Image: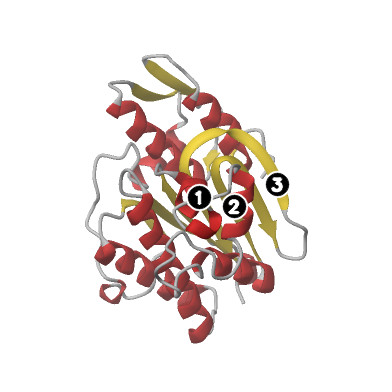
């Protein structure tokens, strides 16, 4: 999204990377004139808020437009704790959004993954087997975040509806502030030689690569998610440390050097089948 009045996902590195580098007691983001904020940035702001509050500092979003402020409240930002998340079977139909939610245990992760599973099948037309592939990949991604993050990961989801159902988009973001992909992979003796974030991210996207060398079933999650994006249409962003990869169906991988942001941040965009 290139609209100058929108904080689309390309703004993530510049906006939040700069904020992480600030030494101010109150870190301010200027929201005047901004008409849209991508869920990726909402979760990113929650992550930054978490870091700053641990340091006794604060995050301020200045001059936010009323419609944007209303959307942020609906998405549970500023984050002040989880709201009740019912199992998807409790809804008459799959949800179009999942507000900012902190995954604190495996049960939380399974509930979120089931919400995504239902939305993919009901709203994007994913066949059962493919939707369950996404479910399994997300479950592993959530497990990785719980094991390697210094605090529980944030997740947020939004289905952007269009008049033409084929133009609908599901955006899911998972962000943590843990040790990052590089440190995680280095726990496996096979990858202890790694020294750069990009090296680690490149490897993490390959099938079967994991920092958990005692469990040969791991290392499927990130590979499967980016493969589904490439095969069936979508976009995949993975950021860790100071490296980011952008993957879009039918295009080569794009690599970016970015300001250092602690942990690992994933944005997954899936299109109708």
The residue positioned farthest toward the top in the image shown:
24
| Residue that numbered label 2 is attached to | 201
Q: Secondary structure at mark 1?
A: helix
Label 1 crowd (10 A; few <14 / some 14-19 / many >=20): many
Marks 2 and 3 close (CB-CB < 8 Å) = no
Look at the picture and state if 209 lies above or below 240. Answer: below
Q: Say which quarter of the image contains residue 208.
A: bottom right
Residue plotted at (50% across, 85% down)? 129
Q: Position of residue 230 (x, y in %)?
A: 68, 68
Mark before the other along the chain sequence, 2 or 3:
2
| Residue that numbered label 3 is attached to | 255
Look at the picture and state if 187 lies above or below 30. Answer: below
Q: Say which quarter of the image contains residue 151.
A: top left
Q: How far is the residue under mark 2 from the one under mark 3?
A: 10 Å
Instruction: Determine whether, in the image, residue 22 is placed left or right of residue 79.
Output: right
| Residue that numbered label 1 is attached to | 181
Q: Quadrant of the C terminus?
A: bottom right
Look at the picture and state if 26 lies above or below 13. Answer: above
Marks 1 and 2 close (CB-CB < 8 Å) = yes
Residue plotted at (56% across, 38% down)? 12
Label 3 crowd (10 A; few <14 / some 14-19 / many >=20): some
Residue plotted at (25% across, 39% down)? 80
Mark before the other along the chain sequence, 3 or 1:
1
Label 2 crowd (10 A; few <14 / some 14-19 / many >=20): many
Q: Say which quarter of the image contains residue 73.
A: top left
Q: Which mark is residue 193?
A: none
Q: How far is the residue under mark 3 from the one under mark 1?
A: 15 Å
Q: Nearer the viewer, mark 2 or mark 3?
A: 2
Q: Secondary structure at mark 2?
A: helix
Mark before the other along the chain sequence, 1 or 2:
1
């Amino acid at each position: 999204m290139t609209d100058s009045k929108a904080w689309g996902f390309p703004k993530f590195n510049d906006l939040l990377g700069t904020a992480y580098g600030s030494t101010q007691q109150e870190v301010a983001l200027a929201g005047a004139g901004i008409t849209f904020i991508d869920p990726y940035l909402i979760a990113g702001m929650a992550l930054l808020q978490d870091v700053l509050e641990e340091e006794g500092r604060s995050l301020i979003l200045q001059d936010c437009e009323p419609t944007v402020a209303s959307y942020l409240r609906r998405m549970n930002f500023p984050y002040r704790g989880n709201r009740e998340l019912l199992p998807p079977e409790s809804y008459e139909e799959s949800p179009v959004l999942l507000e900012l939610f902190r995954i604190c245990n495996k049960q939380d992760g399974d509930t979120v993954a089931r919400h995504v599973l239902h939305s993919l099948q009901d709203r994007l037309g994913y066949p059962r087997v493919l939707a369950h592939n996404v479910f399994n990949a997300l479950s592993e991604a959530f497990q990785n975040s719980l094991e390697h993050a210094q605090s529980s990961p944030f997740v947020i989801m939004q289905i952007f509806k269009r008049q033409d159902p084929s133009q609908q988009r599901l955006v899911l973001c998972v962000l943590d502030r843990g040790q990052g992909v590089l440190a995680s992979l280095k726990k496996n003796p096979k990858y202890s030689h790694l020294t750069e974030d990009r090296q680690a991210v490149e490897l993490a996207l390959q099938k079967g690569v994991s920092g958990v060398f005692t469990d040969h079933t791991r290392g499927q999650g990130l590979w499967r998610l980016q493969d589904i994006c490439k095969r069936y249409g979508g976009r995949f962003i993975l950021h860790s440390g100071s490296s980011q990869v952008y993957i879009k169906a039918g295009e080569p991988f794009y690599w970016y050097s970015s300001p250092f942001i602690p942990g690992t941040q994933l944005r997954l965009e899936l299109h109708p089948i």
